[in-house]
Amino acid sequence: MPSTLLRNAYALYALQLANYIIPLLTLPFLVRSLGTEAFGWLAWSAAVNFYFVLLVDAGMNTYAAKELAKLDPQRKTENRHAAGALVVHVTALKWLLLCASALVMLTCTAMITSWHAQWPLFAWCFMTVVGSAVFPTWLFQGLQIMHNTLFYGLAGRLLVTCGIFLYVDGPQDLLRAAALQSSATFLSGLMALPTILALPCLDWSRPKWAGICEVARQSRHLAITDYALTALANSTVFLMGMVHMKEVVGMYAAIEKTMRAAASMFIPLIQAAQPRWVQAWHRQETVFQPQRLHKWTVVFLTLALLGAVTAHVCAEWGLKLLFNEETARHADWAQILSFWLPFNVANAMLSAWWWVASGREKQLVKRVLPGAMLQATFFALTLTSANTDTALWVWVICEAFMTLLLAYRSGLLSKARL
């Protein structure tokens, strides 16, 4: 098991490193080539489509990865039929939600005047939603074969990156940039399809309506959690686009994406370790705190704090190096968001390791939903009634409040040991 964990962690860290380096190349290039206004439209349309990505995922990514880890069909051959049925029903539900998302997007672009004028941009950005349904990272995570995620994810990213540098040259190439940037996951999914169909640990069967409904019922609590937590990841850009001009949105989106790239460096190990903690919690008769999990949590929190300090100190220099003087003048936004970074990492870790892995999805919803509603509401109110700096400080304080909610009764603060 340790070797499996390390292999998966190395694979995801290699992919995350690529996902970190590639945006550092493409993001400044797009800002300079498209200009802040066109890039603001690109960022805002991507933020809108991201809500449809959440609708397609609907908590099923976490649920399916967790259930596959429990079934462990690679070692328990008697569970291969159940694992194959789970994969089929999750995929079927995702495609039904994809069709519903497409209908909603068509309705919005037809009825909202500002969206209708930019309907080709929204249409190309919708490729992100299609890619979310096509590329099953949850499958590779649950089976603990995440080197496939590395290989196919990196291949799709590299193809798209080459296209951006070759075919994007100015604001007139906005649609090309949207098409290329949104198609990476879709390309990865197409390339991964033969490997998925050839997996020997899954016995394939036809989807049944009862099975699809069962997946929807079982994943409903995780769906609410994912909506509440992940929707917040894009709500700042979306709300900024509703209040400010797209030039301001473009500068803010560039800064926020850079900070989120730093926070996402912790995600691979969280994802790689989650199946292991699922199995560890599942083997216990009662829910209590494993000693090694407690140590990993402390290490992660320490690293997140170090990352926050580095981001705060290097904010102005880093923005000037990556983008331009105009963006660097808003280094105070990056410095404020540096305080957000450790709380964001802590929330992701607490949710995945302490609540989802232990099977307490229903209790997790009761903590996440109120915190998320408060965060989004207070940020929107402050953004419209005060300046952006104050709104970002409110965002950070609400993120810290979310951490307190997740830590309470999670087991993190108890003295129980294995």
Image: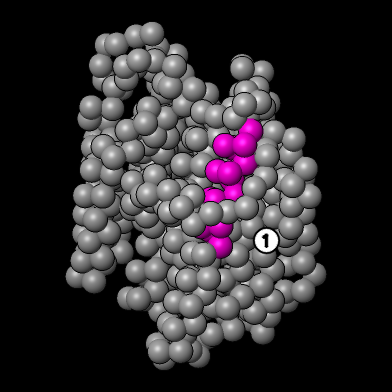
Q: Is residue 6 left or right of residue 198?
A: left
Task: Check the image and report above or below for 7 versus 140.
Answer: above
Q: Which residues are magenta?
A: 80-95
Task: Check the image and report above or below for 396 versus 117.
Answer: above
| Secondary structure, magenta segment, majority class | helix
Q: Is residue 351 left or right of residue 38?
A: left
Residue at the image position 34 percent from the left and 69 percent from the top? 239
Q: Nearer the viewer, residue 405 or 22?
A: 405
Question: How many numbered discs sit on the rendered protein?
Answer: 1
Q: Quadrant of the C terminus?
A: top left
Residue at the image position 44 percent from the left and 61 percent from the top? 55
Residue 91 is a magenta residue: yes
Q: Nearer the viewer, residue 110 or 158?
A: 110
| Amino acid marked by disc 1 | Phe
Crowding at dot 1, Cα within 10 Å, few <14 / some 14-19 / many 20+, comes out as many
Q: Is residue 374 left or right of residue 295?
A: left
Residue 192 % position (x, y): 74, 50
Per the image, the residue denoted by label 1 is: 186
Residue 58 % position (x, y): 44, 54
Task: Check the image and report above or below for 320 versus 299.
Answer: below
Residue 278 % position (x, y): 46, 26
- Any part of residue 57 in sight: no
Task: Check the image and report above or below for 31 versus 284.
Answer: below
Q: Secondary structure at mark 1?
A: helix
